Amino acid sequence: MITAMTDNYSNGGGSRLIRPRYGHRVAGVCAALAAYFKLDANLVRLAFGVLACIWGLGVLLYFLAWAIIPEEGEDQSIAESFINKAKNQ
């Protein structure tokens, strides 16, 4: 499974931080960070789990990363599209 995720980033060697559409557990944040930093996704998941036990910090960071990191095939992140919609109104 880990090799399949790194194959998605083989064109840039993990040079761009994007959430994969496939091969992830929840929203793809851990898979994206693992591919970008060339780590095992389970280590990143473990780090978020430990941080979640510390005042819920892992949950907050995961939610922020989900909003900031764009999904594979998208031009903008969720936060960017929300800000652009607010500007246009």
Image (cartoon, rainbow, N blue to C red):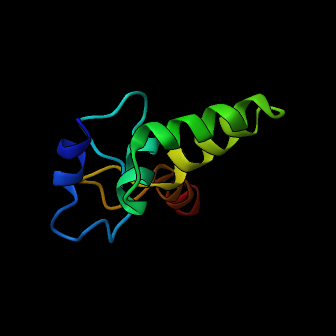
Q: Residue at x 34, y 49 (%)?
A: 71
Up the image or down, 9 lies above or below 31; here it is below
Residue 12 image point, x, y percent? 22, 71
Above or below: residue 1 compared with residue 67 = above
Name the spot of residue 40 as percent of width and height, x first: 39, 46
Is residue 1 toward the left or the right of residue 58 in the image?
left
| Residue located at (56% from left, 58% from top) | 83
Seen in the picture, residue 43 relative to 73 is either above or below; the reply is above
Viewport quadrant of the N terminus: top left
Residues 34 and 80: in front is 34
- Residue located 41% across and 53% down the image: 39
80, 60: nearer the viewer: 60
Up-down relation of residue 53 to residue 62 (above or below): above
81 on left or right of 73? right
87 horizontally vs 57: left or right: left
Q: In the image, what residue occupies the spot 84% across and 33% down?
A: 55
In terms of depth relative to the viewer, which is nearer, 1 or 33?
1
Return the residue found at the far right: 55
> How many numbered callouts?
0
Location of the C terminus by quadrant is: bottom right
Q: Nearer the viewer, residue 43 or 24?
A: 43
The picture quadrant where one finds residue 74 is: bottom left
**Residue 52 appears left or right of 48:** right
Residue 84: x percent and y percent?
50, 61
